[in-house]
Image: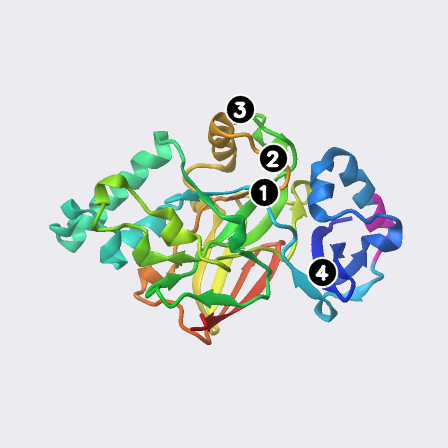
């Protein structure tokens, strides 16, 4: 039986649960009191047990809407793959002057687009992933508020497919990479767009700390769906709306560097650990492509096929 692994908040603390259909199955009711992260640490043995609980529980349990969903877990490590959707990167370059190189600033619009398309085609064929680290302190739940910092003028959304690691991985090949995946989830890599490329030290590269790592800048969840229940991770629709207006509505087919290559690249440089999350890149439709950025009171609603929905209200940072 298909299910997702999630965490709910209760008066007694947080509890791991299964999401079966629209209902919540409390694992403690079935003799399992480990956290989601502890289950991921023992994923090979835990998965058959969770499958048994899902079959036994059937469609019993509380409705999902009646509980408080929090982030499935706080990952030890979070990695993000940037500039990984063709239309997304072209949209950024065309829509946001701060994303352009000095060379492209001198180009006309048609020439700038052609140059961006050429770069993306080259990247898809041979380039290594462009990865960076995001802090675990950014993580919030699928329905929590996103706090817009007072020193950020262009907060932007990036709804993405999240990959959750289920085994320690070092020097993994692309051919075996999926064996190390526990499941998939929804992540929103919220970005302080104007802070990524600093004009004062442009030769030193992107400032990912300032651009990506503010508190609440990674809504995560509502659940982790085991990879066995996701037939094709390259055939998922990623959709995000702000105040009811749809901005992102693309499929994972536009991903240039696949999940397998991302895992292989990362595991050649670091040790991936159970529970680690890889944010695999954002498809087209970010605010910077339209010159629209998040404001206090905005509500983001994001969903990925079969992985659930996030609904996050934006609030201003308190003085």
The residue singled out by tag 1 in the image is 76
Residue 244, horizontal then vertical, whole percent: 48, 73
Q: Secondary structure at mark 3?
A: loop
Residue 304, horizontal then vertical, whole percent: 56, 55
The residue singled out by tag 2 in the image is 273
- Asked if residue 299 is positioned above or below residue 29 in the image, the reply reads below
Label 1 Cα neighbours within 10 Å, binned few <14 / some 14-19 / many ≥20: some
Point out the tag, 4 or 2, that comes first from the N-terminus.
Answer: 4
Label 2 Cα neighbours within 10 Å, binned few <14 / some 14-19 / many ≥20: many
Q: CA distance from mark 2 to mark 1?
A: 8 Å
Q: Secondary structure at mark 4?
A: strand
Q: CA distance from mark 3 to mark 2?
A: 16 Å
The residue singled out by tag 4 in the image is 8
Mark 1–mark 4 CB contact (< 8 Å): no
Which residue is the extreme one toward the left? Answer: 106
Q: Residue at x 37, y 53 (%)?
A: 211
Point out the tag, 4 or 3, that comes first from the N-terminus.
Answer: 4
Mark 1–mark 3 CB contact (< 8 Å): no
- Asked if residue 171 is positioned above or below residue 164 in the image, the reply reads above
Q: Which color mode does the image show?
A: rainbow
Residue 276, horizontal then vertical, whole percent: 58, 41
Q: Residue at x 38, y 68 (%)?
A: 150
Query: Which of the pair 231/102 is nearer the observer?
Result: 102
Which residue is the extreme one toward the bottom? Answer: 297
Label 4 Cα neighbours within 10 Å, binned few <14 / some 14-19 / many ≥20: many
Residue 173, disc:
3
Query: Which of the pair 91/150 is nearer the observer?
Result: 150
What stretch of residues is rendered in magenta?
52-58
């Amino acid at each position: 039986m298909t299910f997702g692994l999630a965490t709910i908040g209760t008066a007694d603390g947080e509890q791991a649960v299964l999401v079966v259909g629209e209902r919540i199955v409390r694992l403690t009711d079935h003799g399992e009191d480990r956290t989601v992260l502890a289950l991921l640490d023992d994923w090979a043995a835990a998965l058959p047990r969770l499958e048994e609980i899902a079959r036994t529980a059937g469609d019993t349990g509380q409705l999902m809407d009646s509980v408080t969903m929090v982030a499935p877990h706080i990952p030890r490590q979070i990695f993000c793959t940037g500039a990984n959707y063709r239309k997304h990167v072209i949209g950024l370059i065309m829509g946001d002057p701060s994303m352009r190189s000095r060379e492209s600033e001198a180009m006309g619009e048609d020439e700038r687009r052609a140059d961006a398309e050429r770069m993306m085609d080259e990247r898809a064929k041979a380039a290594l992933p462009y990865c960076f680290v995001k802090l675990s302190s950014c993580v919030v739940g699928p329905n929590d508020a996103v706090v817009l910092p007072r020193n950020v003028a262009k907060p932007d959304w990036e709804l993405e497919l999240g990959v959750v690691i289920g085994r320690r991985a070092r020097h993994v090949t692309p051919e075996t990479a999926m064996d190390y995946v526990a499941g998939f989830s929804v992540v929103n890599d919220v970005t302080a767009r104007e802070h990524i490329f600093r004009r004062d030290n442009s030769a030193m590269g992107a400032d990912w700390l300032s651009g990506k790592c503010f508190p609440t800048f990674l809504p995560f969840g509502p659940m982790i769906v085991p990879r066995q229940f996701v037939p094709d991770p390259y055939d998922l629709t990623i959709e995000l709306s702000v105040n009811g207006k749809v901005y992102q509505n693309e499929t994972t087919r536009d991903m240039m560097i696949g999940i397998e290559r991302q895992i292989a690249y990362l595991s050649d440089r670091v040790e991936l650990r159970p529970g680690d999350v890889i944010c695999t890149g954002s498809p087209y439709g970010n605010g910077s492509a339209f010159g629209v950025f998040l404001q206090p009171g905005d509500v983001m609603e994001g969903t990925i096929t079969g992985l659930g929905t996030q609904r996050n209200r934006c609030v201003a940072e308190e003085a």
